[in-house]
Amino acid sequence: MSGMRETPPADLDQALIDLEADGPAPSAFERVARWRRACGDAESAAEWQTWSLLPPEQADLRTALAECWRRLGRFDQAARLLNAQAPSWHQLILVLQQHDVREALGLQFQLLHDPPPLEIEHLLELVNLWRDHNQPEPALELLKQLAAHQGGGLSQFPTPLANACADLLEQLHRYDEAASWWEHSLRLDPWQNWPMMRLAHHSLRQRHPATCVHYCRTVLERDPQHRWAPGVLRQGLEQLGARKSLLLHSDPSVTVAAAPACDAGPEATIRDLRCVGLFAMEAPLGLDVVMETWLQTNEPHQSLELWLIASPEPLWLRAAVDQQLRTLDCHGRINVKEWPRWEAQRWPSLSLLLLPPQCPTPHQEASIQVWRPQPIPTL
């Protein structure tokens, strides 16, 4: 937005000039409204159309005219109108578009003493202009000061501003603070891919590869053609040391071996299962026992939640589980979910947890029964 100039219709200049006169004709307002509508700015078009019936105050009209001249790249005309008024955000945008960083810094400092109202659209434009000038500090200061004046703090910012704040913090190499903002943005809108990939990068920096892998796989489930999630996923798998998953990532046609047979499980617990977890497993050892018992003792309309938690081979384990569920022809009744670390509060209905034979027991609720399936030795 900051670098765009809109091509004016031939008669637009005259309409803008006519609107500076006393008692301008309604047709001049309507001409500007048609231009804004043609540019896809329906809100501004409606405002100009309304003014053709009920003209605004002279100061508001001069500000709106300056905005029109600015959009057309006619900064001299815009400055002529704005400089005759009190300092404003519109004036700051114009100064930045004219590349006068020193004057812009002084003007912003002055405005932030008693900030006039600022629409989100113009706030984002200012942030982008500061960023275009490689000035993340004043952009971040603008966001923080406005949040303080408006009350509620930065946590009240909507998604676009939360993302802008996170991006500025990354430019300043304040990655932990940026991560908090990416997380805040995802809480507001969990379906965004960009914040999720930024968090994937941050997880690599923190050497939390399982979390990086989880973020990348979530993005690829939504957008299999995502341009750089596969490369970041590979980095996460390499940092995790997940050789089997790396092999599967490189060649999805690789055959995934079935888990070995194991001893009998806790039948009484399995019969009443609503949620079961596999923790720190490379292969779904014991899952066949659980599924066969559960299918025999539960009605066809009943479903089961299956969590794959903190696997050192996340892609390999998921492929093996999917293969096993297809063999049992019960995939529609099993809701498979994954999570990169142990968080007991995330699974309130978890009643059975399968662990590898030598794996320590994670901190857990007393209601969760632990089973370490033992592979049956082969002759």
Image: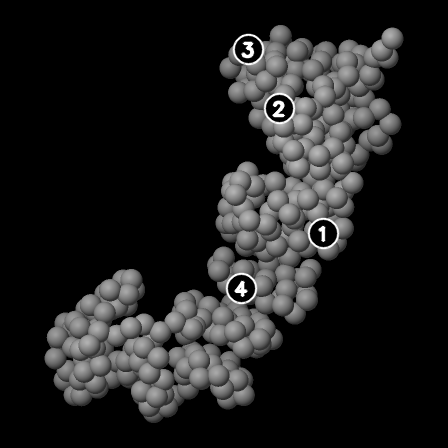
Q: Position of residue 275 (x, y in %)?
A: 64, 24
Residue at mark 4: 164
Name the residue at 71% across, 45% down: 236
Name the residue at 59% across, 73% down: 136
Q: Position of residue 92 (x, y in %)?
A: 44, 82
Q: Secondary structure at mark 1?
A: helix
Residue at mark 3: 299
Question: Is 58 positioned to the left or the right of 286 in the image?
Answer: left
Looking at numbered disc 1 in the image, what kind of residue is underneath it? Leu
Q: Nearer the viewer, residue 38 or 252?
A: 252
Q: Nearer the viewer, residue 56 or 19?
A: 19
Residue at mark 2: 322
Point out the frontmost of discs 2 and 4.
2
Q: Please report whichever mark, 4 or 1, sits nearer to the chain's N-terminal start.
A: 4
**Gap in angstroms between the C-alphas marked 4 and 1:** 22 Å
Q: Secondary structure at mark 4?
A: helix
Point out the frontmost of discs 4 and 3.
4
Question: Is 36 positioned to the left or the right of 113 in the image?
Answer: left
Q: Quadrant of residue 14?
A: bottom left
Residue at mark 1: 204
